[in-house]
Image (cartoon, helix red, strand yellow):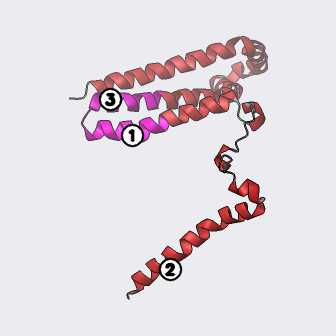
Amino acid sequence: MTLHAVYAALVGIIMPLVADIEPIYRALSKSLRDALDLAHHTFSEVSIRMVRLEKLGLEPWQTSTALMLIVIGFVVYYVIPYSFTFGDFPLFFSILNFILLGMLLGLCITLFPLESRLEHLILWCVLWGKDRRMMPLIRKNMAGHRKRTGKTAVMFTICMSFMYGGAAATHLWRLP
């Protein structure tokens, strides 16, 4: 006998023994009547308990983020290679364009908390000489209007990023 045949024989003897240990232990731990009862199987011992997702720690925003990441993963790992392999370049470039737009949108949302610091930096770069004396007054004015103009700044930034992405898309569509 070869070594492989010995391994196969040992696995054929040991694996059924290991697989039967738990059911035998369960049958011996019950009374004889319960062990021989054919109408009572272990798969029918199901208890249902209703639990809200919030109690499990899953909130709606987490679920929607997970679903969005699943869709993005499917597009990146399946649709892009499919379109590139079969030469469907309009689909390929439009997916890459949507990825670019998503990156720009994420950049805009990420930079939103840094808006006030960027305002101060731009103000410092713009004001020179005698105009620099006006910096505290302009900062107070900008701080007073920040609540009203914050959303406008975000909308403007997102619109500009989509215009940039649209210009990039029209450039990609004109490829020979």
- Mark 2 vs 1, N-terminal side: 2
Q: Quadrant of the N terminus?
A: bottom left
Residue 158 percent location from the top left of the image: 54, 20
Are the residues at dot 3 and dot 2 in contact (C-beta closer than 8 Å)? no
* Residue 48 picture quarter: top right
Estimate how packed mark 2 is, as few (under 14), some (14 to 19) or many (20 or more) residues with alpha carbons within 10 Å: few
Residue 22 percent location from the top left of the image: 67, 64
Residue 63 in sight from this viewpoint = yes
Q: Quadrant of the C terminus?
A: top left
Q: Secondary structure at mark 3?
A: helix
> Residue shown at 50%/80% (left/top)?
10
Estimate how packed mark 1 is, as few (under 14), some (14 to 19) or many (20 or more) residues with alpha carbons within 10 Å: few
Magenta stretch?
Answer: 72-101
- The Cα–Cα distance between marks 3 and 2, rounded to whole angstroms, is 55 Å
Residue 91 marker: 3
Q: Is residue 9 above or below residue 84?
A: below
- The Cα–Cα distance between marks 2 and 1, rounded to whole angstroms, is 43 Å
Name which residue type carries label 2.
Leu
91 falls in the magenta region: yes
> Residue shown at 71%/20% (left/top)?
130
Name which residue type carries label 3.
Leu
* Residue 65 picture quarter: top right
Name which residue type carries label 1.
Tyr
Q: Is residue 3 above or below residue 145?
A: below
Say which residue label 2 marks. 10
Say which residue label 1 marks. 78
Are the residues at dot 2 and dot 1 in contact (C-beta closer than 8 Å)? no
